Image: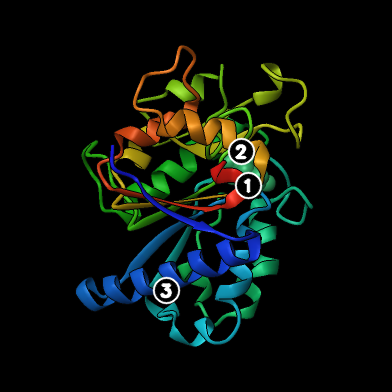
Amino acid sequence: MNFKKHVLSDPAAVGRAAAEHIVSLAQERTGEVGRFNIALSGGSTPQVTYGQLACEPLVRKMPWQQTKIYFGDERHVKPDSPDSNYRMAYEALLKHVSIPTENVYPILTDNDDIAACAEWYEDLLRVQFQRRTDAVPGFDLILLGIGPDGHTASLFPGTPAASELNHWVTWSDPVSVNPNVKPAVKRITITKPLIWNSARIFVLATGKEKAPVLANIFSEAEPANPPVSRLLRQCKGEVTFFLDRAAAG
Ligand code: 6PG
C-alpha cells in the first residue's frame, strides 16, 4: 500500500500542513463538481487543523458555501458536553466561519437508544448521497485520528463495530472491552466500508505514543495482532498521513 506521508517538526506544523491540504482539495473538488464533502475527526489532534482553517489566510480560501461537513464519529453525549466532537469542532472551527448551518450534519445523540442514533445518521447519509440501493457512498475526504490502542474513528479493538461490514454507520461500547478508554462513553461511528470507499483519507497523528501503531500500519509484513487502523491499507482512495517526528518514530 503506497501511503503518502508528511512528517513535520511539531503538532502546530502538522495542523498547518493538514489545513493547507484540506483547502487545496476543497478548491479542487468544488472546481470540478461544485461541492466538497468532508467528514471531521474528533479527539484533540485535529483541533490545531480546525483552528488554522478558521483564520487567515486559509479561512478566506476555503469554499465554505460549497462545503458540506459531516462527522466520522461522535460520543453518545449531549452536544454541549465537553466530550462532544461536535462541540469541539464548533468551538475550534464552525462558529468562526461562514458555512451555512444547513451544510453541517452533526451526528445527533438526542436518542437514548444509541443504535437509533446510528441508524438515523446512516439514513441521513443515504439521502445526502442519494443512495436508494446499498451501494456504499464515499466522502471526498475523511479526517481520521489514531488511538494508541490502534482504533480509528470509533472502531475500537474487540468491539463488533470494528468488524461491521454491512452498515455504513454503527455504534460501539469500547469501555466494555477496555475500561481505561477515555472518555468512558459509547460512540456512534462510520464503519470500514465508508472509509474504504472514500476518495481521500487524511490521518493526523502526533506524539510518540502513536508511533508503535503507525509502525504496525506501515509494516508490509502482516503483524500477528494487527491494529484496527491497519484497515487503512485497504482503502480505495489515497491515504495521506500528517505526522510529527515523534509519531513518525
Ligand atoms: C474520537 C476520535 C478518535 C480520535 C483518536 C485520537 O472521537 O476521539 O474519533 O478516533 O481521533 O482517539 O485522539 P487524539 O487526537 O485525542 O489523540
Residue 200: tell me if it is visible. Answer: yes
Q: Quadrant of ligand 1?
A: top right
Separation (CA) of disc 2 from disc 3: 26 Å
Quick one: label 2 or label 3, which is nearer the N terminus?
3
Residue 28 lies, with reference to residue 231, above or below; the image says: below
Question: The C terminus appears in which quarter of the rendering?
Answer: top right
Instruction: Give SS at disc 1.
Output: helix
Along the line of sight, which residue is nearer the eye, 2 or 107?
A: 2
**Can you give x and y, in whole percent of width and height, for residue 69 in the image?**
47, 63
Left or right of residue 231, residue 109 in this image: right
Amino acid type at mark 3: Val
- Asked if 78 appears above or below 157 in the picture, the reply is below
Observer-nearest residue: 120 or 155?
A: 155
Which badge, 1 or 2, is on the more N-terminal residue? 2
Q: Determine the CA span between mark 1 and mark 2.
A: 8 Å
Residue under label 3: 23
Q: Could you say whether the residue bearing mark 3 is in a helix, strand or loop? A: helix
Residue beneath disc 1: 246
Which residue is label 2 attached to? 210
Q: Identify which residue, 6 or 196, lies in the foreground.
A: 6
**How many other residues sit within 10 Å of disc 2, few (<14), some (14-19) or many (≥20)?**
many
Horizontal placement of 132 versus 185: left or right? left
Instruction: For the N terminus, give its image quadrant.
Output: top left
Distance from Cα at disc 3 to Cα at disc 1: 25 Å
**Which three-letter amino acid code belongs to the residue tagged 1?**
Ala
- Name the spot of residue 123 as percent of width and height, x first: 40, 44
Residues tagged 1 and 2 counted as in contact (Cβ below 8 A): yes
Rendering coords of residue 155 (x, y %): 52, 31
Is residue 34 or residue 114 the one in the foreground?
Answer: 34
What amino acid does circle 2 point to? Lys
